[in-house]
Image (cartoon, rainbow, N blue to C red):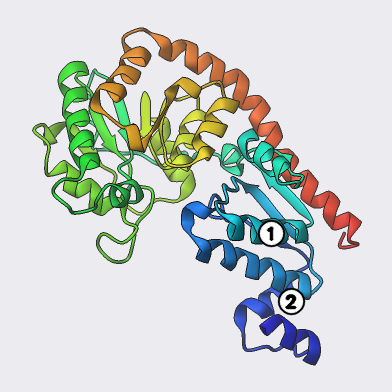
Amino acid sequence: LGAIYLRLTKNHSSRIPIIKCLNDADIIIDVSGDTFSSDYGKASIFSIGARIISAKMLRKPVVLYCQSIGPFRGLIDRLFAKLFLKLVDLIIVREFITANYLRRLGVHAYVCADPAFLLEPSPNAIVSQIPSSHKGPVIGINLSQYIDSLCGGDNPANKYRMIMSQLIDALIERYKAHILIIPEVKGQKPNSYDDYYVSRRIVDLLKHKEHVTIVAGDYSPSELKAIVGQCDILISPRFHLVIFALSQCVPAIAIAYSHKAYGIMDMLGQSEYVLSYEDLSLEQLMEKVEKLWVDKACAKVRQELKIRTNEIRKRALNAGRLVRLLLKQKGKL
């Protein structure tokens, strides 16, 4: 409605901030990640669709940038998602599972890569709590509030908290590891999109708290990437942390809650190191760590990542080139 009002009145001082931003822009680049999907409900699909329609009513080119899109379940979701997608000028996805899914819907997309592969780690991010005398592996772990909520939150029967606390104790006992718990998402309220809250609850369950460090400060993405780079292995459901690891040739075990994990790990030849959160078990996690650490697969994985990440970075840069080409076509450059 705000877009209609602005088109009719040409009132560039609109009191609707998002509509004014859309009107002032030369191009609209949507970076919704993986939320354009039935996984997040109809509200998410229609919210993104409303932004697309508003931008098109204001005659702005629209880009869906480096996303993992779908699946869309049910006739209504598929019908409206396809309608919204057909309005978009340029769709760039970050893995082939999405591209193949969109192709089946009759929607074309370019496959590039997540821009997080291009982020440079900060040279100043140091986690001083890791003992300098520590000789064993440093294993980074993200404890995700999102996965925790899917598994019951503060319900005492929450299997995620039980499995992850058992995993941390087992890693310390078997490998003499120091565990670096790395929250990615922090909320303003306790237990509200807050990995730190869940991390504290799980640490409370541990037998070996003295071998665990929670990264509790406020860090920029480049600082977080540098922290991840200090690890020998990363275990995480938060996929940008996984990308931070892989792009620095740190072997990672991804806990998947959507197809983006399977798609991106496959592009890097790491499909065997993905586990669904629904089937998560201590035995499966320990088996993956065992393969990496005891069977000396780490060196092989690091070498493969070194080769593959060069190609992935080229793909990530190509996304920017596609946007630039669209701007030229629209006479904005």
Asked whether, in this view, residue 118 is left or right of residue 183, the answer is: right
* C-alpha separation, residue under disc 2 versus residue under disc 1: 13 Å
Q: Which tag, 2 or 1, sits closer to the chain's start?
A: 2
Identity of the residue furthest to the left in this view: 207
Q: Position of residue 3 (x, y in %)?
A: 71, 81
- Name the residue tied to disc 1: 29
In the rendered view, would you say 9 is above or below 297? below
- Residue at 24% across / 46% down in the picture? 199
- Please state which amino acid type lies under the numbered disc 1: Ile
Asked whether residue 228 appears in the rendered view, the answer is yes
Q: Position of residue 291 (x, y in %)?
A: 36, 13
Asked whether, in this view, residue 208 is left or right of residue 109, the answer is: left
Quarter of the rendering occupied by the N terminus: bottom right
- Please state which amino acid type lies under the numbered disc 2: Asn
In the rendered view, would you say 146 is above or below 84? above
- Residue at 65% across / 62% down in the picture? 80
Secondary structure state at the residue bearing disc 2: helix
Secondary structure state at the residue bearing disc 1: strand
- Name the residue tied to disc 2: 23
Task: Tell which of 263 and 301 is nearer to you.
Answer: 263
Q: Position of residue 249 (x, y in %)?
A: 50, 24
